[in-house]
Amino acid sequence: MYHRIVAAKLRNAFSDINSGNWQSMVDTLAPEFTYVFYGEHALSGERHTVESMSLWWQRVFRLIPEAEFEPQEIIISGGPWLTKVATRVRIGGPLPDGTRYDNVMTQFMYLKWGRITEIHTLEDTVVLQRALDRIAASGNAEAHAEPITDETARAARPG
């Protein structure tokens, strides 16, 4: 029963993100967490603060404003004290040049008592980089920006 509840919450989180409400995902992060998106591109990097995660989600929707996440498979093990989750998610959305971004992402997550402590995201980086190149070619230089990390988030703070 517990695993079904976790799977339903994850599907709801992706549905919220598809509606533009990424904040509900950020709200489930534990006080101490790690989010890693592997690769070397504008969406890659490692984050540990709500501030850097919020800036990262804002960037995602500036780059692919109509991004849609469709969970294909969710595998859950463990109890509430340490839950391990693996997901396979289709991600897609229109690009500024009229083409469509279509990729598959896998995530490995750890939760403790309903709060996310770790997320490791793997996406086909060749497909992603091609999309980012198209976005940059359309005039959005942020598609080739440095990754958002805790350090870049701190540096971007006024004052």
Image: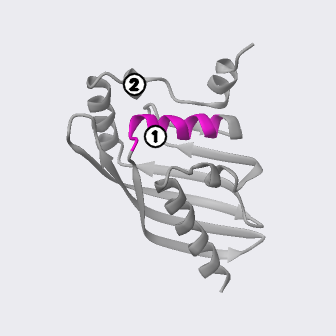
x and y, in percent, of residue 16 in the image: 54, 58
| Residue 68 placement: quadrant | bottom left
The residue that appears at 57% across and 74% down in the rendered structure is 8
Q: Secondary structure at mark 1?
A: helix
The residue that appears at 40% across and 35% down in the rendered structure is 63
Q: Tell me the kind of residue under disc 1.
A: Phe
**CB atoms at circles 1 and 2 under 8 Å apart?**
no
Q: Tell me the kind of residue under disc 2.
A: His
Nearest to the observer: residue 56 or residue 107: 56
**Where is mark 2, residue-wise?**
144
x and y, in percent, of residue 110 in the image: 66, 61
**Magenta region:** 52-65
Q: Secondary structure at mark 2?
A: helix
x and y, in percent, of residue 3 in the image: 62, 79
**Where is mark 1, residue-wise?**
61
Nearest to the observer: residue 124 or residue 97: 97
Q: How many marks?
A: 2
